[in-house]
Image (cartoon, rainbow, N blue to C red):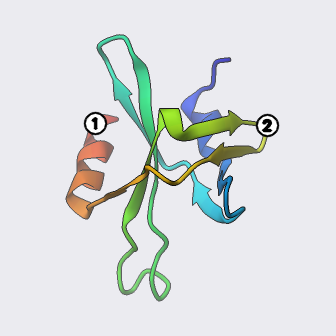
Amino acid sequence: MLFSFNELKDKEVIDKQSGSRIGYVDDVVMNFDGRGVESIVVYGRPRAFGLLGREEDLVIDFCDIDLIGEDTILVNLVNSKICTKEKRFELKNLLK
């Protein structure tokens, strides 16, 4: 099944074990050596309406994605990594 980035960013990411809403796909990490998408990134939630910055970003490996549906993406957060702010800026620059 093929998805464009515009279709992925409109999907809500939900933790399969707890049923909690994580957010929406904000970025995609790709491997250009022919392997395709490695992980998706959900940016941290803003603190105090964005005045105090954001929480840490969540990087979810593609192997941790259980199901990509029409509106949602079900994931297992057991092996997820927290991304630092410096790394988030590197990911943004990668897709420009």
For this view, does 61 lie left or right of residue 90?
right
The numbered mark at residue 72 is none
Q: Is 57 placed above or below 61 here?
A: below
Q: Which residue is mark 1?
A: 94
Camera-side mark, 2 or 1: 2
Determine contact: label 2, label 1, CB under 8 Å. Answer: no
Residue 23 horizontal/vertical position (percent):
60, 60
Q: Which residue is mark 2?
A: 70
Residue 57: name its quadrant. bottom left
The x and y percentages for residue 89 are: 26, 53
Amino acid bearing label 1? Leu
Q: Does 67 appear above or below 27?
A: above
Estimate the x, y position of residue 16 in percent, counting from the top left.
68, 53
**Helix, strand or loop for disc 1:** helix
Q: How many marks?
A: 2
Q: Quadrant of the C terminus?
A: top left
Q: Quadrant of the N terminus?
A: top right
Q: Residues within 10 Å of mark 1 (few under 14, many from 20)?
A: few
- CA neighbours of label 2 inside 10 A, class few (<14), some (14 to 19), many (20+): few
Amino acid at circle 2: Glu
**Residue appearing at x 39%, y 16% in the figure:** 35
- Residue 8, above or below 53: above
Residue 38 drawn at (x, y percent): 41, 30
Mark 2 vs 1, N-terminal side: 2
- Which element type, helix, strand or loop, lies under badge 2? loop
Distance, label 2 to label 1, CA atoms, is 27 Å
Q: Measuring 58% from the left and 38% from the top, which residue is drawn there? A: 65
Left or right, residue 71 beside residue 79: right
From the viewer's perspective, is residue 80 above or below residue 93? below
User: What residue is at 59 percent from the left and 27 percent from the top?
Assistant: 4
Residue appearing at x 26%, y 61% in the figure: 84
